[in-house]
Amino acid sequence: MFEFSQYLGFLLFLTILTIGFWLMFFLVGFVSYWVTGASWEMIKEKRARKRQEEQSIKY
């Protein structure tokens, strides 16, 4: 059967695997949120710049 040290090694492996999974899950969510927000801000800035140029051309 298994010895106690092998059992502890297996538990350590499962712990590290679980922590890695949840860290990856968190980072994927955070990075997608960050990229979406940065893209949205860039689009808003381009729209504002375009409107400002159109207003400066009119007057």
Image: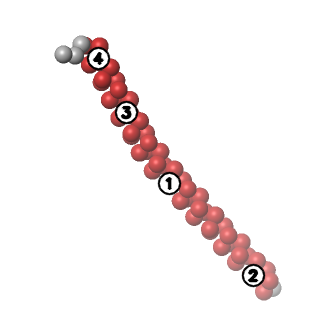
Q: Pointer 4 and pointer 1: residues touching (CB < 8 Å)? A: no
Q: Are marks 2 and 1 in contact (CB under 8 Å)?
A: no
> For residue 4, which quarter of the picture?
top left
- Side of 24 relative to 46 (left or right): left
Estimate the spatial distance between the alpha carbons at disc 2 and disc 4, rounded to whole Å.
73 Å
Image point 18% across, 16% down: which residue?
1
User: In the drawing, what numbered circle is on residue 6?
Assistant: 4
Residue 32 tag number: 1
Q: Which residue is mark 2?
A: 55
Above-or-below relation of 17 to 6: below
- The residue type indicated by label 4 comes to Gln
Dot 2 or dot 1, earlier in sequence: 1
Q: How many marks?
A: 4
Q: What amino acid is at disc 1?
A: Ser
Residue found 44% across the figure and 42% down from its top: 24
Residue type highlighted by circle 2: Gln
Which circle's residue, 4 or 1, is located before the other in the chain?
4
| Of the two numbered discs 2 and 1 in the rendering, the one whose residue sits closer to the viewer | 1
Q: What residue is at 50 percent from the left and 55 percent from the top?
A: 33
Asked if the residue under mark 3 is in contact with the one under mark 4, i.e. CB atoms within 8 Å, the reply is no
Residue closest to the far front? 1
Q: Could you say which quadrant of the image residue 38 lies in?
A: bottom right
Where is residue 36? Give x, y as percent: 53, 59
Q: CA distance from mark 2 to mark 1?
A: 35 Å
Q: Nearer the viewer, mark 1 or mark 3?
A: 3
Does 29 sit above or below residue 54? above
